[in-house]
Amino acid sequence: MNINLSIDVVETDNQTVLTVKGEIDAYTAPLLKEKLLPATAKETEKIIVDLNDVTYMDSTGLGVFISALKSAKEHGSTLTLVNLQERVHRLFKITSLDSIIEIDTTIRGGE
Amino acid sequence: MEHFDFIEMKLPAKPEYVGVIRLSVSGIANRMGFTYEDIEDLKVAISEAMTNATTHAYEENEGGEVTVGFGLYRDRLEVMVADHGGSFNLSEVKQQTGPYRQSEPIENLREGGFGLFLIDALMDKVEIKSDYGVIVLMTKNLPTNEVGIDDDQISTSQ
């Protein structure tokens, strides 16, 4: 169990992919914000956040994604969350944030 | 009087200890026989309460500590999270919580409005007292359809 957070950022033409691993809470959320917000401040950027290896998240994580969504909209960029674990996805459903934040629920092959 | 075991922890009111309290509640709830789903709910609820307490302490510019008490009953777990900060406007906080409503413009969404809402959604019973500092008392019930040690079959309610 890793209660810390690591984030890989890969930038290509007009697209930024963040791969997030670990737990998102009050301690680690500022790191996520620091890595995610600059990408959303680019014009017409496509931002994809891969949450496959995020094993825990609470409202501090929801807060970061709300900020990121606001910033993306201001800059004509898009934000998509992919590969959410069921527990993490559940928080977006309970709070109804899944109605405004784009979440790709495509089931991955072989899993 | 109803018997229970009690565990108390005092932690610095700092965000780096939210993960520590999460591991603790996970261990306690696991020992009591909670399901995986219930343990995950408990982890989120207790983290939210601890986060509120640390944010509160930070805003008041105090070092401070947070006291977390676990009451382990036969049929439920009670968790108390208390900070010892200054006063706190409960009705104001309650007004600011709730799920996202479709009519609400995204620009008005607050980053921090979901903590208390999640505690309420994930626990069976929640009480908040704000007379002196803030105390969140929350209860999660153990599933009642447990199979007793002498039972030789599982009964399911359809």
Image (spheres, coloured by chain):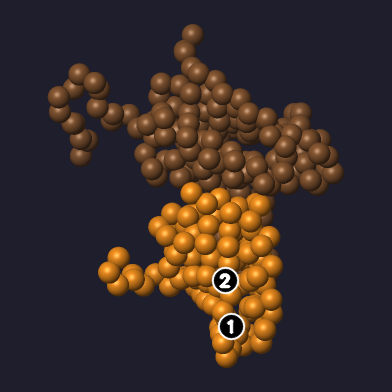
Chain colours: A orange, B brown
Frontmost residue, B115 versus B106: B115
In the displayed structure, does residue B131 sit left or right of residue B104? right
Frontmost residue, B130 versus A50: A50
Distance (Cα) linking label 2 and label 1? 10 Å
Q: Is residue B33 above or below residue A5?
A: above
Frontmost residue, B111 versus A5: A5
Name the residue furthest right: B61
In the displayed structure, does residue B86 sit left or right of residue B41? right
| Residue A36 pos. (x, y %) | 63, 71
In the displayed structure, does residue A109 sit left or right of residue A38? left
Quarter where residue A65 is shown: bottom right
Q: Is residue B79 above or below residue A65?
A: above
Q: Is residue A81 above or below residue A75?
A: above
| Residue B149 pos. (x, y %) | 24, 21
Q: Residue at x 58, y 75 (%)?
A: A9
Q: Which mark is residue A11?
A: 1
What's the amino acid at mark 2? Asp
Quarter where residue A71 is shown: bottom right
Subunit bearing disc 2: A
Q: Residue at x 57, y 91 (%)?
A: A13
Mark 1 crowd level (few <14, some 14–19, many ≥20, 10 Å Cα): few
Q: Residue at x 73, y 46 (%)?
A: B55
Q: Which mark is residue A8?
A: 2
Badge 2 and badge 1 in a common chain:
yes
Q: Is residue B27 above or below residue B121?
A: above
| Residue A51 pos. (x, y %) | 49, 65
| Residue B44 pos. (x, y %) | 53, 46
Q: How many marks?
A: 2
Q: Residue at x 40, y 57 (%)?
A: A86
What's the amino acid at mark 1? Glu
Q: Secondary structure at mark 1?
A: strand
